Amino acid sequence: MFNPNTIDDIANRLADAVPSGFNHLKDDMDKNFHAILQSALEKLDIVTREEFEVQKGVLAKTRSKLEALEKQVAEIELHLQPETAN
């Protein structure tokens, strides 16, 4: 889903931003930041670019089929109109 290396990088940056007086807590904070970030990102229900592009293609194909079906229905309705007018 989300690149684990990116989460590690963000967690490390957050831990590095902790004031030097708390260096003894750095490893623990790094692990906690990592867990919090992972949990928060999972709740966002994010998709990868690849998944997005696949769904975009499916949508375009579906839209094209729908437009073709709408055209067919319009043609059928046009052919039926003279028969119902009699």
Image: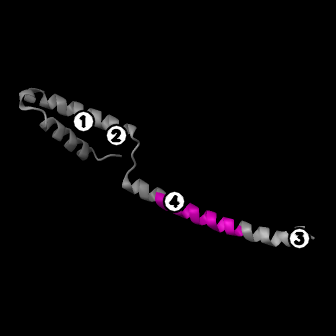
Residue with the mark numbered 4: 58
Q: Amino acid at mark 4?
A: Val
Residue with the mark numbered 2: 41
Answer with mark 2 or mark 1, whichever residue precedes in sequence.
Answer: 1
Q: CA distance from mark 2 to mark 1?
A: 11 Å
Q: CA distance from mark 1 to mark 4?
A: 35 Å
Magenta region, residue range:
56-72
User: At 13% from the left edge and 37% from the top edge, which residue is drawn?
Assistant: 17
Q: In the displayed image of the protein, which residue is found farthest to the right?
A: 86
Residue with the mark numbered 1: 34
Query: Horizontal placement of 9 versus 60: left or right?
Result: left
User: At 73% from the left edge and 68% from the top edge, which residue is drawn?
Assistant: 74
Q: Main secondary structure of the magenta part?
A: helix
- Residue 82's quadrant in the figure? bottom right
User: At 18% from the left edge and 30% from the top edge, which residue is drawn?
Assistant: 29
User: At 36% from the left edge and 46% from the top edge, which residue is drawn?
Assistant: 1
